Amino acid sequence: MDTLSNAGMLLGGSWASGINLYLTMAVLGIADRLGIINLPGSLDILSNPIVIAVALLLYFIEFFAD
């Protein structure tokens, strides 16, 4: 069952990244930090504050560049 939930998280994340990769990374990291979702071990790095900050910075750069 754990493999199925990991696959669901990865599929949902990959679909959402089609919208914007950086915003998806930031939202997943923030949601994990707030305890809304539990990311699997391989995606746990997304909840690091530095990764969240860099993802938000890159999102805003891309948003204003467009």
Image (spheres, rainbow, N blue to C red):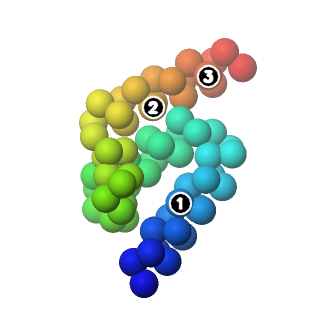
- Label 2 residue SS: helix
Which amino acid type is marked by label 2?
Answer: Ala
Residue 55's disc is 2
Residue 52: image quadrant is top left
Q: Residue at x 47, y 43 (%)?
A: 25
- Label 3 residue SS: helix
Upstream in sequence: badge 2 or badge 1: 1
State which mark lies toward you, 2 or 1. Answer: 1
Residue 10's disc is 1
36, above or below 16, in the image? below
Which amino acid type is marked by label 3?
Answer: Glu
Q: Residue at x 53, y 39 (%)?
A: 23
Counting from the top left corner in percent of width and height, residue 15 is at: 66, 55
57 left or right of 40 in image: right
> Does residue 36 appear in the picture of this structure?
no
- Mark 2, Cα crowd under 10 Å, few <14 / some 14-19 / many 20+, is many
- Mark 3, Cα crowd under 10 Å, few <14 / some 14-19 / many 20+, is few
* Image quarter in which the C terminus is found: top right
Residue hosting label 3: 62
Q: Residue at x 54, y 70 (%)?
A: 8
